[in-house]
Amino acid sequence: MASAIPPSPGPRQVGALALLRRWKLWLFPTVLSGLVAMFLSLLYMGGIVDPSRSLHHLPIALVNGDTGPPPPGQQQNVGAQVAAAVVAGTPSGQVSWHRESLARAQDELASGKVYGALVIPADFTASIAALTTPNATGRPTLTVLTNPSAGSLASSLASQITQGAAQQSAATIGKQLSANAAAGGADATTSLLLADPVAITTRPGYPISSHSGLGLTAFYYTLLLVLAGFVGGNIIHNGVDTALGYADTEIGPLHTRRPTVPISRTQTLLLKMGMTAGIALVTSSLVMVATVSILGMDAPHAGLLWLFSYCAALAVGLGVQAINAAFGGIGQLISMFVFIALALPSSGATVPLEASPSFYRFLGNFEPMRQLVGGVRAIIYFDARADAGLTRGWVMIAIAIAAALLFGFLMTRYYDHKGLHRLTPQPPEDRV
């Protein structure tokens, strides 16, 4: 009886310990991982370490509604003096004071053009003068208006600056009144009142609803759209390459490779971009279902928000496909920096760009998340006003889509023209 033929031994297996001794195997992943970790740390922490020191023309409205005549011997009423002192007392370049009427200031708050306001009332001079007479009914009031729709940190910074300026002005007025009262022999009660003559109140100048995350829902919603476009684009990229036989599939111990489909780089990119356009409909819709329908996020213009969401996710997804087609395997890392690493700290959504270093203000001119946050914020907070960032958002989406199509297809056509095809040798059968 014939004996069974033993199977031929496979290739000699290499141990992990032996490979760990090869320094060249460590070199590329160590250098690349270290650089990514360092750059990410510098990018994210660099924008938030000290916002107060980075202040650059933070927009705040200054409303002098005082209609009283100037006090005897003075050329300006007290309101005008306070307004001038507020501007002069702010370090140069840190704040951009918008001298406006109350109606105009309310409009700028309602469009996100200013992060807060300081309002001097119409009877301010008369109320100050009445403090030294029996006609005084209470302390005059300066009002600080906040704008939570601009983001909690932006509104907080503006409120701190405005309150500080108001308190400094009140202290100056108190010193002047106390000196005059002392010269006139005022009693102790009057002197105590004149030492702190102005009350400062704070209230929302443009309130938002309780389901707006204190002004942060616009940022997180935009982040979801960017992630949907970025992650979805990479899933499509890898899935198509696997389905066409240009990449292997490994699930646990299972390994398969499909027959290679002969297709040009240009046609492959067209396929991926077509799928991106279709799948973005699903992902952007599900983002709205989860945030608006299930979690109850306020979305007063739901139809417009859905259309903007789809176009935003589509623009990011097409950009991912173009970058991956141009740069190959390292394209996913490059697109991560373009759409995530550089975009988040320059979005101006958590830390306003006016409180960020100049590098982030520069990035904010073209990085996609800055433009998308402005559009989403305009839709859900500012009644879809075009001048609140919606027009800029639409324009930048159109530019991004056009740039992705132009760059992607120019690169793939160039590769095809040079004969740099993706066809690779195919095993005779699938192996599982």
Image (cartoon, helix red, strand yellow):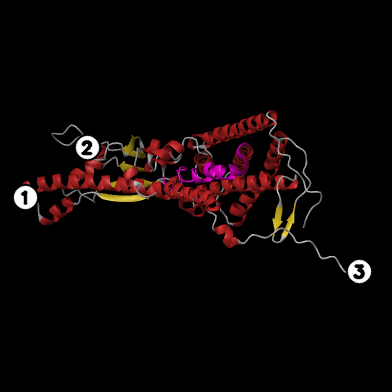
Q: Name the residue under label 3.
A: 2
Q: Main secondary structure of the magenta part?
A: helix
Which residue is pictured at 13% across the width and 53% down the height?
191
Above or below 239: residue 322: above
Counting residues from the N terminus, which is met first, the one under dot 2 or under dot 3? 3
Instruction: Measure the alpha-carbon separation of dots 1 and 2.
Output: 26 Å
The residue depicted at 54 percent of the width and 50 percent of the height is 24
Magenta-drawn segment:
326-351
Q: Which amino acid does label 2 sit on?
A: Gln
| Residue 226 visible here | yes
Compare residues 15 and 264 and report the one nearer the observer. Answer: 15
- Closer to the camera, 141 or 68? 141
Amino acid carrying label 1: it is: Gly
Would residue 192 be counted in the magenta stretch?
A: no
The three-letter code of the residue at mark 3 reads Ala
Q: Which of marks 1 and 3 is nearer the N terminus?
A: 3
**Residue at label 1?**
185
Q: Is residue 13 above or below residue 69?
A: below
Helix, strand, or loop for circle 2? helix
Question: Sequence-wise, which precedes: disc 1 or disc 2?
Answer: 2
